[in-house]
Image (tube, rainbow, N blue to C red):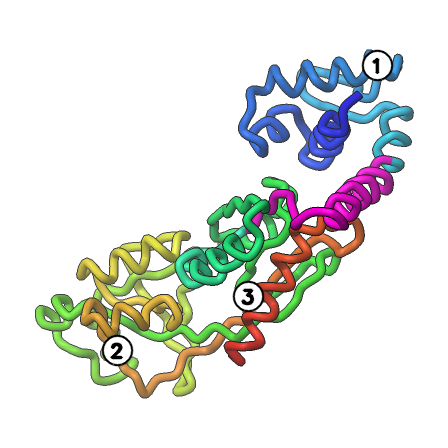
Amino acid sequence: MKIDDLRLFLSVVDLGSFAAAASSIGVPRAYVSRRIGELEADLGSKLFTRTTRKLTLTPTGEIYYQQLLEIIPRLESLNESIKNQRNMPTGSVKLGLIGDADIVAHNLLQEFLRKYPLITLETHVSNLGYHDILTYGLDACVHIGEMKDSSFVARPLMRGLRKLYASPDYIAQHGMPTSINDLDNHALIIHRLANGELEDKWIFNQGEYRTHSRLISNNSSYVKHAVMNGAGISLLAELSAEEHVKSGELVEVLPECEVYVDDVWLVYPSRKGMTHAARLLIDSIIEEARKLDL
């Protein structure tokens, strides 16, 4: 019996199906089904009741699941602590990043890999923030905006300012807006948020503006790319846009209008049972945020 099979069993339960567990680790569904079947054979007991529509735990499977939730993290932590007493830190970490955070965090992550050459780092980029932790088996993730799930640990990193930007070519062709109401005469690009809501109301220090748009995206990288290529005006994170302003690829629109800020969090399930490698990365990110003093 391998510890990887026990982890796989936990993943199937957490994600609700063999297919979802297989997708989370990039293997065929048949592989997961076979490994779970071998685990059941070793135990001499069925862990799941399978039907064409539903996968449910047997009473034995439920007891096994609850016990493994305690045992596996302790075993992993013990194994790593013993290794790290004699060697450099080892292991792998899966970090979720949102939008352009992968670009902003690049230097920090490269420095982390230089400092810990035996640790493997995998990044997962999406706009769903902490919602992806269980789906993709992430050790931690960056989340922007309100935290609605108290079962996760959320550490504040910074407050992310967003401003209005356009490309020089767009401004040359359509002119520079002189007021918030002047945005009525321009092409706007808006976001669809992780919860599915349309961000069609922009909140400025000078009031709210109800947007109108023919171009909508749930991907902040796409929105920035569209703005840089002259498709219109949009709200972009200042941290990801400032280098393009310096290079002349973007210009700030209505700079006197301050846009509300989003809280940026580092979110993870719990420190209990956390691997040593994940703990080192989390501590590194939090320490770097303190240095930025944002």
Residue 209: x and y, percent? 37, 75
Question: Mark 2–mark 3 contact, CB under 8 Å?
Answer: no
Instruction: Report whether residue 195 is seen.
Output: no
Q: Which residue is more in the foreground, 31 or 231?
A: 31
Quarter of the figure with the N terminus: top right
- Please report the residue visible at 30 percent of the width from the left and 60 percent of the height from the top: 224
Q: CA distance from mark 1 to mark 2?
A: 65 Å
When asked about the image quadrant of residue 43, the answer is top right
Please give left or right for residue 15 compared with residue 175 in the image: right
Provide the residue span drawn in magenta: 68-95
Neighbours of disc 2 within 10 Å: few (<14), some (14-19), many (20+): many
| Residue 10 part of the magenta-drawn span | no
Label 1 residue SS: helix
Q: Which residue is mark 1?
A: 42
Neighbor class of circle 1 (other Cα within 10 Å; few <14, some 14-19, many 20+) is: few
The one of 22 and 213 positioned closer to us in this rendering: 22
Residue linked to disc 2: 253
**Label located before the other in sequence (2 or 3):** 3
Q: In which quadrant of the rendered view does residue 91 lie? A: top right
**Please, is residue 141 above or below residue 241 in the view?**
above
Q: How many marks?
A: 3
Q: Earlier in the sequence, mark 1 or mark 2?
A: 1
